[in-house]
Image: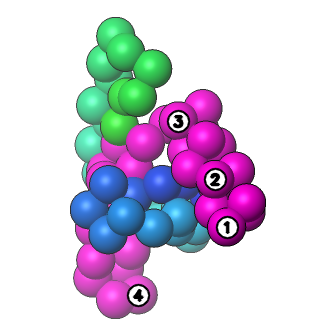
């Protein structure tokens, strides 16, 4: 699953990452924190719906 990271401002593939914390909010842009064990980075990503908007805008560029 490819989601938008608000820390590095890029789309990241979280399928091989470990979910650390799920920040379920009432808004559409709820977030989750994933840990990439390969390089020790953590990513705070938006949900699928919000990430899809960023992915579509990147494809247009």
Residue 61 in the image: above or below residue 20: below
Q: Residues within 10 Å of mark 3 (few under 14, many from 20)?
A: some
Q: Residues within 10 Å of mark 2 (few under 14, many from 20)?
A: few
Residue, disc 3: 50
- Please indicate, yes or no, whether residue 34 appears anywhere in the rendered image: no
Whichever of callouts 2 and 3 sits on the residue coming sooner in the sequence is 3
Q: Residues within 10 Å of mark 1 (few under 14, many from 20)?
A: few
The alpha-carbon separation of the residues under discs 4 and 2 comes to 28 Å
Tell me the tag on residue 38: 4
The alpha-carbon separation of the residues under discs 1 and 3 comes to 18 Å
Q: Circle 2 — which element?
A: helix
The alpha-carbon separation of the residues under discs 2 and 1 comes to 7 Å
Whichever of callouts 1 and 3 sits on the residue coming sooner in the sequence is 3
Residue sitting at x 52%, y 67%: 12
Q: What residue occupies the far front of the structure in this picture?
A: 61
- Magenta residue span: 32-61
Residue 31 horizontal/vertical position (percent):
35, 37
Residue 42 is left or right of residue 5, and the answer is left
Residue sitting at x 40%, y 28%: 29
Residue 34 horizontal/vertical position (percent):
36, 58
In front here: 57 or 10? 57
Whichever of callouts 4 and 2 sits on the residue coming sooner in the sequence is 4
Residue, disc 1: 61
Residue sitting at x 26%, y 62%: 7
Callouts 2 and 1 close, C-beta under 8 Å: yes
Q: Circle 1 — which element?
A: loop
Residue 58 is left or right of residue 3, and the answer is right
């Amino acid at each position: 699953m490819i989601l938008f990271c608000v820390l590095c401002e890029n789309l990241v593939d979280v399928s091989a990452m470990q979910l650390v914390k799920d920040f379920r909010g009432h808004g559409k842009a709820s977030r989750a924190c994933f840990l990439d064990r390969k390089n020790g980075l953590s990513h705070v990503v938006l949900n699928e719906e919000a990430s899809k908007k960023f992915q579509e805008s990147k494809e247009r560029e």
